[in-house]
Image (cartoon, helix red, strand yellow):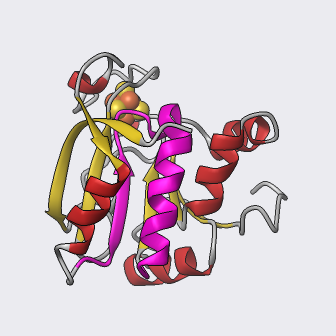
């Protein structure tokens, strides 16, 4: 398994990519090509820069106020194996993991039996924010989603805590709770 991750950029302190103060890594490479995407520089897999998992872990440890990490992109599931390793290391530090994806959860679960990296990253994700950005359904009002088709899905108890910290039913379009992999029943 690769021990480096190709990233378009890093935000060492963000409050806009999940609850609390977070380290955010933007994966390089994205197959979705959503119209209106704010990060078109992430489309090509050949761009960006390689970072070792230990370097990223060091960055996380440098800030004791960080609540966790957010894996964004680009498409994190294109580098699911190494990002799962990083997410696992953040969990060992006591942090939580928010993962954005342009795939729907159902697509990822369907791949997980054949692709160990996808399975591992789902297992290490506490809160999944899924679905492509759909310009016609863009929302500037809802926390942590770009368009109203996207869902906030808790995949673990930590994910449920993250949801409780950000969600009131009136302000978020779709919220799901599904523990992975213990509960494979799809929403
Ligand atoms: S999934 Fe995200 S990064 Fe990829 S094209 Fe869509 S909005 Fe852009």
In terms of image quadrants, where is residue 8?
top left
Quadrant of the image occupied by residue 62: bottom left
Q: State the residue in front, 80 or 35.
A: 80
The residue depicted at 24 percent of the width and 52 percent of the height is 140
- At horizontal 45% and vertical 40% (from top left) the residue drawn is 76
Q: Nearer the viewer, residue 85 or 155?
A: 85
* Direction from residue 53 to residue 169 in the image, left or right: right
Report the magenta residues as a range.
Answer: 66-94
List x then y, in percent, for residue 135. Answer: 34, 30
**Is 52 on the left or on the right of 124, as rendered?**
left
Residue 136 showing in the rendered view: no
Q: Is residue 87 above or below residue 101?
A: below
- Quarter of the picture containing the C terminus is bottom right
Asked which quadrant contains residue 45, the reply is: top left
Q: Residue at x 34, y 59 (%)?
A: 144
Question: At 47% across and 83% down in the image, what residue appears?
Answer: 164
Between 181 and 59, the residue placed more toward the observer is: 59
Relative to 77, say whether 69 is above or below. below
């Amino acid at each position: 398994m690769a021990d480096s991750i190709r990233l378009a950029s890093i935000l060492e302190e963000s409050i806009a990519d999940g609850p609390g103060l977070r380290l955010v890594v933007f994966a390089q490479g994205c197959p979705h090509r959503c119209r209106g995407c704010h990060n078109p520089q992430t489309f090509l897999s050949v761009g960006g820069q390689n970072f070792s998992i230990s370097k990223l872990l060091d960055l996380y440890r440098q800030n004791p106020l960080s609540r966790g990490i957010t894996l964004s992109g680009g498409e994190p599931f294109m580098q699911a194996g190494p990002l799962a390793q990083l997410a696992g290391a953040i969990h060992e530090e006591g942090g939580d993991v928010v993962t954005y994806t342009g795939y729907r959860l159902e697509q990822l679960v369907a791949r997980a039996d054949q692709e160990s990296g996808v399975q591992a990253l789902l297992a290490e994700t506490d809160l999944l924010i899924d679905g492509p950005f759909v310009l016609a359904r863009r929302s500037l009002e809802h926390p942590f989603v770009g368009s109203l088709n996207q869902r906030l899905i808790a995949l673990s108890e930590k994910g449920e805590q993250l949801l409780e910290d950000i969600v009131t039913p009136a302000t978020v379009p779709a919220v799901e709770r599904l523990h992975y992999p213990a509960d494979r029943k799809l929403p």
